[in-house]
Amino acid sequence: MLPTKPHDWDEALAPEKQWQAAYGFVEERIKHLFDKLQNPRHFTTDEMVEFLYPGDWARGAGITARKRIYTALRALAKHGLADYCEPGPQRKLKHTGKLVTPLIWRAPPPAAPKLCPHCGGVL
């Protein structure tokens, strides 16, 4: 179940927590989120963080927790949640002019059925 209280996130993502535990917490919540969504939709990274831990809730330790969610998502996009994200359209930043490619988070595509190498039937 997704935590709804800021204290849950603050505790799970506290700076003294090991990164493996903190990132695992975020990974578990995102998988649960996409499993429970009735109408699968796409999220940008900013929308995902806002959905998981709204900025209005962030005070003190909450600001640190939200930063750690961003860090976790960046790492998990390459490893634990690679099936849950894809690169979005490139855009240019207003202030620096740098080109960036945001991540788009979505439910993973359904797995292709395994086929028998001999007869071609579905296993």
Image: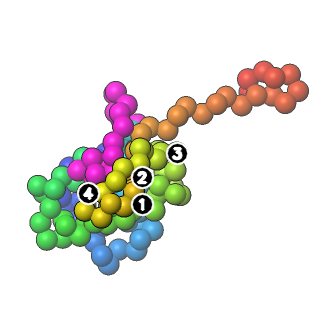
Label 2 is placed on what type of residue?
Thr
What separation in Å lies between label 2 and label 1 (alpha carbons)?
A: 12 Å
Q: Earlier in the sequence, mark 2 or mark 3?
A: 3
- In the rendered structure, the answer to whether residue 66 lies left or right of residue 90 reads left
CB atoms at circles 4 and 3 under 8 Å apart? no
- In the rendered structure, the answer to whether residue 92 lies left or right of residue 6 reads right
Residue for badge 2:
101
Looking at the image, is 112 positioned above or below residue 80?
above
Classify 10 Å Cα crowding around label 3: few (below 14), some (14-19), many (20 and above).
Answer: some
**Of marks 2 and 1, the one in the foreground:** 2
Residue in the picture at 11% in, 55% down: 56
Q: Can residue 114 be seen by looking at this rendering?
A: yes
Under tag 2, what secondary structure? loop
- x and y, in percent, of residue 100 in the image: 39, 56
Residue for badge 4:
94
Under tag 3, what secondary structure? helix
Label 1 is placed on what type of residue?
Arg
Say the numbered circle drawn on residue 83: 3
